[in-house]
Image (cartoon, helix red, strand yellow):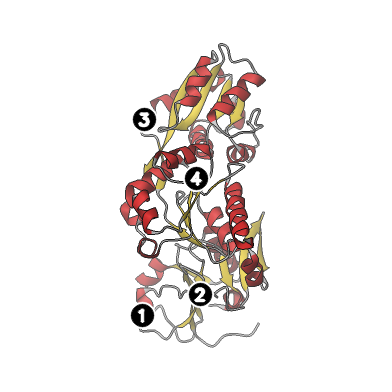
């Protein structure tokens, strides 16, 4: 492999936290002497770069480590610095300690440039570089192409949604309105997990609940068999998928992904009279599900495992969105509606940007929007992120054909 001649390159990876990298960056990476990595880029991209550095015996430094070193730039060494690109075609941010150096800055190619980018994926321990030479042409045919779409999900949950939007040629705008944290009162949680064998059913009302439950479960137990023999119910496919990834069989998942439908489905599967149920849910969850289960005769331990809190103003503020608006606002929970409204005041915002459309993931989210007298443009069916994408695509396709 031909050796480079002592240069410093700055490459953008993104957009935002998506794992897209230019083909040139991927080609030069194995030939570098030193790599400087911005840890704000996609986790998958970070893993890929670390893998290549280990494979090719390249010195790898974080931004903080590189900044602490004197004479980081050696004229005989080839240095690659990877930093986050906010959008397609945008230049990556130049670290302060490289100011004044002779840098070759290479933005993440724009979709219109015709340049090839790689979408990094991983299957088992194998990293795959998927060449997307025809990506621009495909994306321009998608109904969501060039649409500015606001994603209000928590930062910890938004990556796959943002990636799916970018793959369709849209311009995702991440404005996380909520964050998920463990419930501060652990007493009821600890007692419930210690006494799992006493329950006939464990009911999960969200994927967050699954993740929070098992993060606490494995602090006490080392073996999944300690979960016991309780039957498992999940409110919808995203929740059920989280459970299946843990190799747990979901006994009941209703066709309609609501609390009322879930209660009826459990009762149809197994008469609930005197059945003990552990309900794993957020602090601010709807009171309908525990009430319905109790009306059916069940003995319900309704325990909040996590809190959904509003994000900080620093995280939520987006000057570009405030000034220019967007094409779509997407909401994946009633709590995201509440906290986004608290910060941006939805009715005046929609009056200012009259073409701004609203996408809701399901009935509870739609109910929260209607309570603010906001018209919902589309509602997902099924009530999943994929359903949300499909609903927006269908709407835009119909508008285009008129």
Hey, which residue is sitting farthest front in the picture?
402
Q: CA distance from mark 1 to mark 2?
A: 21 Å
Q: For residue 246, what is the image quadrant? A: top right
**Counting residues from the N terminus, which is met first, the one under dot 1 or under dot 2?**
2
Residue 332 numbered mark, or none: 4
Q: Residue at x 42, y 86 (%)?
A: 102
- Decide if residue 32 is in sight here: yes
Residue at image mark 3:
185
Q: CA distance from mark 3 to mark 4?
A: 26 Å
Marks 4, 1: nearer the viewer: 4
Marks 2, 4: nearer the viewer: 4
Residue at image mark 2:
89
Residue 99 numbered mark, or none: 1
**Counting residues from the N terminus, which is met first, the one under dot 4 or under dot 1?**
1
- Residue 225 locus on image (x, y percent): 62, 28
Q: For residue 249, what is the image quadrant? A: top right
**Counting residues from the N terminus, which is met first, the one under dot 3 or under dot 2?**
2
Residue 202 numbered mark, or none: none
**Taking 388 as reference, is 137 left or right?**
right
**Counting residues from the N terminus, which is met first, the one under dot 3 or under dot 1?**
1
Q: Residues within 10 Å of mark 4 (few under 14, many from 20)?
A: many
**Counting residues from the N terminus, which is met first, the one under dot 2 or under dot 4?**
2
- Decide if residue 132 is in sight here: no
């Amino acid at each position: 492999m031909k050796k480079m001649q002592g240069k410093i390159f700055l490459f953008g990876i993104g957009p935002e936290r998506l794992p897209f990298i230019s083909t040139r960056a991927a080609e030069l990476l194995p030939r570098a002497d030193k790599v400087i990595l911005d840890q704000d880029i996609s986790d998958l991209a970070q893993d890929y770069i670390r893998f290549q550095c280990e494979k090719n015996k390249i010195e790898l430094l974080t931004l903080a480590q590189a900044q602490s070193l004197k004479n980081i730039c050696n004229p005989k060494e080839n240095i690659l610095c990877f930093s986050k690109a906010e959008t397609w075609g945008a230049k990556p941010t130049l670290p302060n300690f490289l100011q004044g150096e002779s840098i070759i800055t290479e933005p993440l190619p724009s979709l219109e440039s015709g340049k090839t980018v790689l979408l990094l994926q991983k299957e088992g321990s194998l990293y795959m570089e998927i060449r997307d030479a025809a990506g621009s042409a495909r994306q321009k045919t998608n109904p969501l192409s060039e649409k500015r779409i606001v994603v209000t999900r928590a930062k910890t949950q938004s990556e796959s949604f943002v990636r799916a939007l970018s793959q369709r040629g849209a311009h995702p705008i991440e404005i996380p309105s909520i964050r998920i944290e463990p419930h501060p009162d652990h007493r009821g949680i600890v007692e419930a997990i210690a006494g799992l064998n006493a329950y006939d059913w464990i009911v999960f009302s969200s994927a967050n609940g699954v993740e929070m439950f098992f993060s606490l479960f494995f602090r006490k137990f080392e073996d999944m068999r300690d979960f016991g023999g309780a039957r498992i119910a999940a409110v919808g496919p995203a929740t059920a998928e989280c459970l299946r990834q843990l190799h747990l069989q979901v006994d009941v998942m209703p066709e309609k992904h609501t609390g009322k439908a879930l209660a009826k489905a459990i009762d149809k599967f197994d008469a609930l009279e005197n059945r003990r149920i552990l309900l794993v849910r957020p602090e601010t969850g709807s009171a309908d599900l525990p009430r319905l289960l109790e009306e059916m005769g069940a003995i319900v331990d309704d325990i909040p495992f996590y809190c959904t809190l509003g994000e900080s103003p620093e995280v939520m503020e987006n000057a570009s969105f405030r000034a220019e608006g967007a094409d779509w606002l997407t909401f994946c929970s009633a709590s995201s509606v509440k906290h986004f409204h608290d910060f941006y005041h939805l009715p005046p915002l929609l009056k200012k940007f009259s073409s701004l459309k609203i996408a809701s993931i399901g009935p509870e989210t739609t109910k929260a929007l209607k309570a603010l007298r906001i018209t919902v443009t589309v509602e997902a069916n099924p009530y999943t992120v994929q359903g949300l994408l499909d609903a927006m695509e269908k709407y835009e396709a119909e508008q285009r054909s008129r």
